[in-house]
Image (cartoon, rainbow, N blue to C red):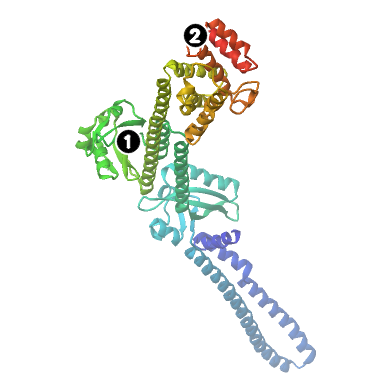
Amino acid sequence: MNWAFRCLTEYVRRDNKESRSERDSAMRESGFPSARRIAVLYALFGGLWILLSDRLLAAMVSDPQRMSTLQTYKGWAFVAASTLLLYVTVKHEFRGRRRVEGTLQRERDFSTTLIESSPVFFVAINADGETLLMNDMMLGTLGYTSDEVTGKNYLATFVPEADREMLSRVFRSLVTERKPTVNENRVLAKDGRERLVEWHGRPVFKENGDFDYFFGMGIDITGRRQAEVQAKRRLRHLAALHAVDMVITASLDLNVTLNVFLEQLTSHLHVDAAAVLSFSSHTQTLTFSAGSGFRTDRVQRTLHRLGECSAGKAALDRRTVAVFNLPQDPEDHDCTRLVSDEGFISYFAVPLISKGNVNGILEVYNRSPLEPDPEWVGFLESMALQAAIAIDNATLFRDIQRAHSELTMAYDTTLEGWARALEIRDKQTKGHTERVVETTLRVARAMGMEEEELVHIRRGALLHDIGKMSIPDSILFSEGPLSEKERRIMESHPRHAFDLLSPIRYLRPALDIPYCHHEKWDGTGYPRRLKGEQIPPAARIFAVVDVWDALLNERRYHSAWPREKAREHIRSLAGKHFDPEVVEVFFRLEQDG
């Protein structure tokens, strides 16, 4: 870099008339013998010639006449010798001068080639701010010729007004600090376009220390900076799309998703407001779902029919509709008063399409003119796709929830039907199932069971006697004591309940009560002789509730018991038939009513 600056500095110096004359003077004084030095050399040679030749002749010849003749010859010899000496000396000097001038010319040609063929900018500016030099690369980029820039004030001609004060400070600091600098500034082209240039500059000083001119070598980084800005913008767009995608994945609340979506959209597109309109295929209308950036609530009363206004046309034609001057668009003005109430100028409507279906419209509003580039429009359409996916997911989830609820209601209605069928078979147990279900759920809640468990407890309580469907009426409705064989048949009904319900997948979690509610805390129950905490909690709770309800209501084999008698009986069986903890919780609830 320093070597290049030296070469280019010499190039500029040679194009400066004042500097060139000073350099030629210095060159004559330091690089070549002057006429005075040649004269001194000639005088020294002549003096030595006269001194030595006269002494030599005086020693050799004493005859005056002969001496006179030899003096004549000596004179001609001096002329010949001095002429030869001058010829050799001058020829040597001119040969050296031509060699130096050739070297200087080669350096000049090299500097010229370096400057003019370089892919970077070169500029030289004198102390008055006038342009001394601008290379072809810079001239071509800015659209000037050399004659148009030479002598022009650099700041006033080539620097935007907003940057002039800053660059002027840079020039002043270069002169005072006397060291190179690196900075970026904008440069004006002839047609008014701006280029961003990274400059490597340094001041050049005269031999007396005064500032001579500023020399700068610049790289046009306009394209690079635009690429960096574009890359950062794309990264922000990807981050916004990712944020929306994360919300879609994490939240099934469409309102939350759309609010986050609209915040990201208005922020990254730099627009004033945006709204999502939902499309109803039944009514063929678009209605407001969510909005951001509006000053009034008028947008919330939006109701467009398919094909009406820009939004309706976007939905009907399945294409993006842009209106760049809403006040001058009578169709949209008649369709909504948002233009006058909100002061909107620019508008975009993008259909929200997912799986081939139009789910709604994404509307974008701005209160100043928009000049979107293809990347802006591409990001808008990508965000619209995200919104369509969010609406589709929410709709799908809502439909699944509704279907699940309907299916669950159908399951529970079926189970209630089975329970009623059992009660119809045995009229004396009418209302028993409903009572034990309600009480069992109360006790289960009091013992800290989760709502998910209560669903299965309810189903199990409804079906607790489903196994009795396999018991013959003669045994089930017997009013006397059962024989050993009949008792074994009766005690098989929990096993029949298991065999009947276990193939039904959604009822497997509810098997604890039908299968185990006749097990006893001390291990003497049936059908598996489970003991203590081996018995499922739901079955332990139901066992207390079932016996309590059976004692308080008339059966064919006993009359209804008084509550106090039933209470004492249940307490007496705590730790034998029943889980003591369940008994304690049960009676605490029973006492509270």
Amino acid at dot 2:
Ala
- Can residue 496 be seen here? The reply is yes
474 versus 12 height, above or below:
above
Residue at 64% in and 87% down:
80
> Where is residue 374 shown, x and y percent of the image?
36, 49
> Where is residue 264 shown, x and y percent of the image?
42, 36
> Where is residue 448 shown, x and y percent of the image?
57, 20
Q: Nearer the viewer, mark 2 or mark 1?
A: 2
Q: Please, what secondary structure does the residue beneath circle 2 have?
A: loop
Q: Are marks 2 and 1 in contact (CB under 8 Å)?
A: no
Residue occupied by mark 2: 560
- Can residue 130 be seen here? The reply is no
Amino acid at dot 1:
Tyr
507 versus 84 height, above or below:
above
Between 451 and 346, which is closer to the camera in this rendering? 451
305 sits to left or right of 179:
left
Q: Please, what secondary structure does the residue beneath circle 1 have?
A: strand
Q: Quadrant of residue 52?
A: bottom right
Q: Which mark is residue 365?
A: 1
Between 450 and 227, which is closer to the camera in this rendering? 450
Residue at 38% in and 58% down:
144
